[in-house]
Image (tube, rainbow, N blue to C red):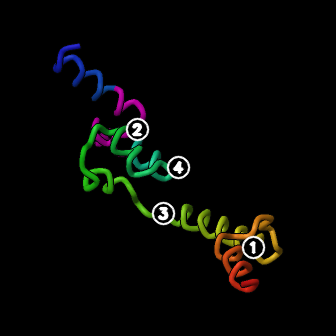
Amino acid sequence: MKHSGFRRTWHRTRTAVGLPSLHFHDLRHIGNTLAASSGASLKELMSRMGHSSTRAALIYQHASQDRDKAIARVLGQAFKKAQAGGHKKPSGTQRARKIIKFQ
């Protein structure tokens, strides 16, 4: 598709969906922001976008209230599990403390 043909098609399409001021690059930004909020790592975002620097990928790492709540919920569940003795295997520190006590 030639640039002029794409431009006409893009203008008609964005007007038809009620987003006349949407830029084509905005789609890239939205897609990468959604990928970041879904849990994509910095390296994954860099690969997805074709960037070699972390600086560019960090632009898409917007903090959101929904993500903050999800993180807090997962941390809360992990804390409750730890309090309830959910760890079946002792940690390396716990094993080392037992060894030191017996020596």
Task: Please tell me which residue lies in front, 24 or 45.
Answer: 45
Question: Is residue 42 shown above or below 68?
Answer: above
Residue at the spot x=29%, y=21% of the render? Answer: 9
- Quarter of the C terminus within the rendering: bottom right
- Decide whether the magenta segment is chiefly helix, strand or loop: helix
The part of the chain drawn in magenta is: 13-30
Q: Quadrant of residue 18?
A: top left
Where is mark 4, residue-wise?
38
Mark 1 vs mark 3: give the one in front: 1
Disc nearer the start of the sequence (3/4): 4
Residue furthest to the right:
84
Whichever of callouts 1 and 3 sits on the residue coming sooner in the sequence is 3
Number of the label disc, if any, that sits on residue 18: 2
Contact, mark 3 vs mark 2 (Cβ under 8 Å): no
Q: Nearer the viewer, residue 88 or 48?
A: 88
Residue type of the residue flagged with mark 1: Ala
Tally the numbered discs.
4
Q: In terms of sequence position, does the residue under pointer 3 or pointer 2 come before the other?
A: 2
Image position of 59 (left or right of 32): left
Disc nearest the viewer among 4 and 2:
4
Q: Is residue 93 above or below residue 103?
A: above
- Residue drawn at (28%, 53%), measured in percent from left and top? 54
Q: Is residue 30 visible?
A: no
Relative image position of residue 56 (x, y in whole percent):
26, 51
Q: Amino acid at mark 2?
A: Gly
- Would you name the residue on which mark 3 appears? 64
